[in-house]
Image (cartoon, rainbow, N blue to C red):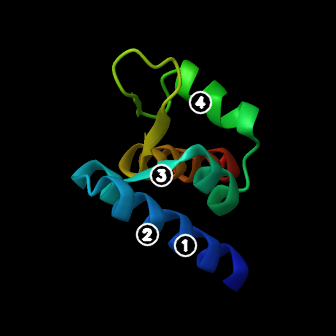
Amino acid sequence: MLAILKAHLKMKSKYQIKNNAAVALNSYRVEQVQALYGLSRSKVFELIREGQVTSASLSSPGKSRGVRLISRESLDELISASITTSNKEGQE
């Protein structure tokens, strides 16, 4: 667990230094979501595609590749909703 947190802090600080964007403070890159939440890359993109989490793609004009940032708030809401649903199912 400690290794995951260290990796998260290392990735996040690199991103903040390079871009110095406020959005980075409340967002994770796909790799960070994978490490922190134990999700596969395809599952992360499935959640984005289904609209279950909010994301933004940042890229330079004329470039086809960029950085995908996923809202930490939307991930927290998804988890809270899952916990609530699980608790209700267990009470029945």
Asked whether 72 or 22 is in front, the reply is 22
Residue at 48% across, 31% down: 66
Q: Residue furthest front?
A: 62
- The circle on residue 13 is 2
| The N terminus sits in image quarter | bottom right
The earlier-in-sequence mark between 2 and 3 is: 2
Q: Are marks 2 and 1 in contact (CB under 8 Å)?
A: yes
* Left-right relation of 32 to 23: right
The residue type indicated by label 2 comes to: Ser
Report crowding for label 3: few under 14, some 14 to 19, many 20 or more residues within 10 A (C-alpha).
many
Q: Are marks 3 and 1 in contact (CB under 8 Å)?
A: no
The residue type indicated by label 3 comes to: Tyr
Report crowding for label 2: few under 14, some 14 to 19, many 20 or more residues within 10 A (C-alpha).
some
Residue at 44% across, 41% down: 69
Query: Which percent across, then down, holds residue 39?
Result: 72, 47
The residue type indicated by label 4 comes to: Leu
Q: Which residue is mark 1?
A: 10
In the structure shown, which secondary structural element does the residue marked by tag 4 occupy? helix
User: Between marks 3 and 4, how big is the CA–CA gap?
Assistant: 14 Å
Asked whether 7 or 36 is in front, the reply is 7
The residue type indicated by label 1 comes to: Lys
